[in-house]
Every structure is written in structure tokens, then in C-alpha cells.
Image (cartoon, helix red, strand yellow):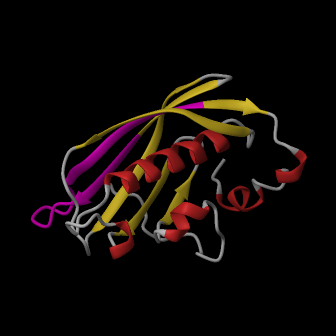
Amino acid sequence: MEPSTKSIPMKEILDAPLHVIGFEISEISPQKIFGYFLVAEKCCNPFKVLHGGVSALVAESLASMGAHVASGFRRVAGIHLSIHHLKSANHGEIVYAEAKPLNVRESIHVWEVNLWEKNSLNLGERILISSSRVTIKTNMVIPKNVKDAAVNIKKYAKL
């Protein structure tokens, strides 16, 4: 069963770089972050396919968001990203993304993030575009100048 594509209102900017590329988040929980985006001109390399850096941006953003929720809204920081680009996504296609935790500990999380498109012949089948592992440092102290950083995400997280 595919996750819902009903998205969180775009007026709520949960992650500024994701917002810039038009990424729509539709599920936030400590067990999963899910969303999708249209491969627009601003997401493409000169060959009109999804830029690998955009895939990496989505992977680190979703894993960080998930670790932030799973750690009780503590400050987090990405410390390692490994990504495999398996297939191109063309300009105008919709790409789905899902982040799930593989290992959650007190100070380190490891998340898997997959980007895929739906098979036009079999809509239940996922065609993998990229697969990533993201290691996140968690439970860091939130500085006073950004103490409200979690306000928007707390509104939508399913805890």
C-alpha cells in the first residue's frame, strides 16, 4: 500500500531547501517520513534529468527530519551520507521519497532513504531511482536562538 499523497500545507515550511524544490511532505513520524516532488527545471542537470545533488538533498533532509522527530525534537546533524544513483528521473516526472530508521540509538541514528517512481504499467510497483544511508548525530543541545525550530514539524508529526 502506498503512503498518502495528501500533503502538509505548503505555507508551513518544514525544511527550506525542500520547499524550494517543491517537495511535498505527506507523512511525518518517528518511523517514517514520506513525500514527493515533480522533477522541475530547477531540479535538473543540463540533460533534463534529476540532478544527483537534489537526490542527496532529499535524502539528508528527510533523514534529518526523521531523526529530529525520533529523538524527541532534539537538535540533529548529518555526519555521513552514502547514495547510489540507480536510474534517472526525467523532467516532468513525479518522484516519491521515503525515509525509515535502520538503527536508532541515543546519540546516533542510521536512516535509509529511497527515491522511486511508479511503474506506469503496474502502479503498485516502485522503480528505484536512488537508495541512501544517512548517519545522523542526535540529542544535541538546541541553541537559544533557534529554540522554536521544531514548532511547525510538531504540528504534523504522528507520535
Say which residue appears at 53% left-offset and 50% top-offset. 61
Give the left or right position of residue 71, taking residue 88 as reference: right
Helix, strand or loop: magenta stretch: strand
In depth, the one of 34 and 88 nearer the eye is: 88
Image height of 64 relative to 46, above or below: above
Q: Position of residue 139 (x, y in %)?
A: 73, 30
> Outermost residue, right direction?
144
Image height of 15 relative to 128, above or below: below
In depth, the one of 156 and 24 nearer the eye is: 24
Say which residue appears at 25% left-offset and 72% top-offset. 91
Numbered marks: total: 0
Give the left or right position of residue 75, taking residue 50 as reference: right
> Outermost residue, left direction?
121
Q: For the magenta stretch, what is the residue range?
A: 113-136
Say which residue appears at 59% left-offset and 75% top-offset. 9
Q: Position of residue 118 (x, y in %)?
A: 22, 61
Q: Residue 12's quadrant in the figure?
A: bottom right
- Residue 95 shown in magenta: no
Say which residue appears at 22% left-offset and 69% top-offset. 48
